[in-house]
Amino acid sequence: MTERLLWSPLRLGPVTLRNRIVFSAHLTNYAVDGKPSPQHAAYYAERAAGGAGLIITEEHSTHPTDWPYEKLIHGFNRDVIPGYRAITEAVHAHRTPIFAQINHNGGQASSMYTRLPVWAPSAVADPLFREVPKAIDHDEIAEIIAGYALVAANCAEGGFDGIELQCSHSSIVRGFLSPATNRRTDAYGGTLANRARLLLELVAAVRAAIGPDLALGVRLCGDELIEGGTTIEDAVEVAKMVEATGAVDYLNTSIGVATSSLFMIEASMHIPPGYASFIPSALREVVDLPVVGVGRFKDPLQAERALTEGHCDLVGVVRGQIADAAFAAKSRAGKVESVRLCLSCNQECVGRMGLNRWLGCIENPRTGREAEGVGAPRPVALSRSVLVVGGGPAGLQAAIAAARNGHRVTLCERHELTGGAVRLAASVPNRAEFGDLVRNQFHEATRLGVEIETGVTLDAAEVLRRRPHSVVVATGARPARPYWAPGDEHRIVDVIEVLDGAAAPSGRVVVLDELGFHQATSVAELLADRGCDVEVITPGMVVGQDLGITLDLETWWMRAESKGIVQTTELVPMGWDQGTLTLQHHPTGTMHERTPDWVVLAVPATPAEELYLELLDAGVDVHRAGDVVAPRRAHAAVVDGERVGAAL
């Protein structure tokens, strides 16, 4: 391995890190009644055991007016301190330092939980929450500062090694720094020096509260990516002001605003890795403080390159360590091939946060359930032979879980390659990284000794001939024709038929989106790139509506516009007659027609359950997982596979 800088120690004030990999702050929704939970301790401890150089917890609220989402840690209440100690002791057991991020979300919050006005520098409503905040007066500013100092002291008592001030994508401090949200005319508004006044007062108050023995960091937004907002030039000047205080030990960075430009903060696979490196690079040119760089770092080679090219001094790897808690340890040992690479799909991490659920991972069923022991080896007393039929994500995960517990596992896949529908999904424009799910599972299965046979089709007779003790059927689903589509019409095809090459639509193509996710939008792009005139039609109010949850919607709109893809909503297909597609506008009942050359269906599939039912009737100890149970998305297949395989 050549990652010399990545594994070199670095000092942040009184704290020395053993390497440059930072598990940066991010929301988890693990809090219970405003307090840290045992799941917090297990989650952070596992990343510490996995070799992270520094862990920075999710934000701790500094004031009762700040409650933007339900499962927030209320750091201003002293009853959080026992939970703090549980977290820090668990992490320190692995000789890893841990910092607490503290914050007040300001105008990027909600009065839903507090029934109090939202506080902000000015009465400017956030575009997501849409609440007009109260412009705080000087007494309230003093109250905010006192709240930060109080929470910092609580964190110090709870055993944390440092404090990070969140002043970037969602923060009242960001609100003060940004000319887009700070319209004040007093000493806290107007010039950049005035807009930075609150930040500098917070630095002084927090340093006084924690003393010299804890590290202190500041996370700044380098570019808000909104009209009239903070720019990189502003961030550079603020960084110099922060360093001039002499009270801060490092700077962390961010890009975007957590509402208006959130899709750039937690970028999906459609945004290139390292996309935000210009921000720490610009800050490093003007300050001597160590600077953390972030921006979709997927593997240790990318992280090392950012260090050697001088963009940053430390690298924030969040989703990479959500997917694989041992990211750092595996990388340090030179076992890069065994790292479970993050897909940047945002389905179970960012997406679950948006749905008010606990943080998980599409490919790692253990993430978010560490305290419950999910995914841990549970050796069986008697090793049995297990046959898994189907090599998609459900079958592979079932094989992994069964082999991890000591069973002898054989997996049979009828195609020449494993991966199932995931492999096809990764073949469309800008979705290649989704294929890492297959790569990661295949590597883990072979490491555990699973015997994988490809190009093998099993019927019930062949399964019985092999005489396994248990069978897991993960044969997936097959395309289904909707009621209105004639079965013999060759110009009406499923997205699967387009992706596997069975159909090659041309000319005018209508893509029907009844799934609301990547299936329709991805195939629409693929066909547009092939020269087709594409219109995506959906019964919903938005084409690909769930892309908003994974932060893919904005970039889809941009690409659709550039490729000339038409998007039409609220139309329900009603019939097909000699080349004419009839649709109803369901809000008004009016009828519409299209005369496309081809229709491509992204519609619910049907389980391919015949083998399962035959084996069940034959009295075989048979189980099923994934789409053969009910056609869903990849995360459900992985969860199913884990549950079934671990229970054998």
Image (cartoon, helix red, strand yellow):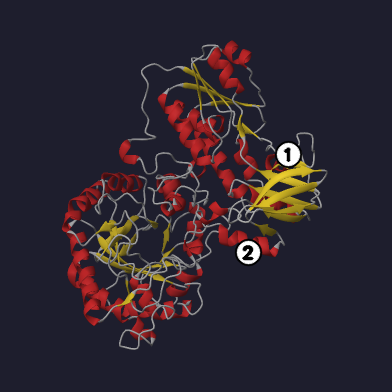
Establish if 360 lies above or below 444.
Answer: below
**If the image is split into quadrants, where does the C terminus sit?**
top left
Left or right of residue 309, residue 48 in this image: left
Task: Report how far apart the C-alphas of labels 1 and 2 lie in the structure.
Answer: 32 Å
Query: Which SS class for mark 2?
Result: helix
**Is residue 404 visible in the rendered structure shown here?**
no
Left or right of residue 260, residue 193 in this image: left
Q: Position of residue 345 (x, y in %)?
A: 52, 50
Q: Nearer the viewer, residue 642 or 488?
A: 488
Q: Earlier in the sequence, mark 1 or mark 2?
A: 1
Q: Position of residue 34 (x, y in %)?
A: 25, 54
Q: Residues within 10 Å of mark 1 (few under 14, many from 20)?
A: some
Left or right of residue 80, residue 240 in this image: right
Left or right of residue 630, residue 294 in this image: left
Q: Position of residue 592 (x, y in %)?
A: 73, 54
Establish if 435 lies above or below 560.
Answer: above
Q: Nearer the viewer, mark 1 or mark 2?
A: 1
Amino acid at the residue labelled 2: Met
Amino acid at the residue labelled 1: Ala
**1 and 2 marks in contact (CB < 8 Å):** no
Query: Which SS class for mark 1?
Result: loop
Q: Residues within 10 Å of mark 2 (few under 14, many from 20)?
A: few
At horizontal 73% and vertical 51% (from top left) the residue drawn is 510
Q: Position of residue 146 (x, y in %)?
A: 20, 72
Total count of labels:
2
Query: Which labelled disc corresponds to residue 485?
Result: 1
Residue where numbered disc 2 is placed: 558
At horizontal 69% and vertical 36% (from top left) the residue drawn is 481
**Is residue 412 visible in the rendered structure shown here?**
yes
Q: Nearer the viewer, residue 14 or 565?
A: 565
Establish if 461 lies above or below 297.
Answer: above
Q: Nearer the viewer, residue 611 or 245?
A: 611
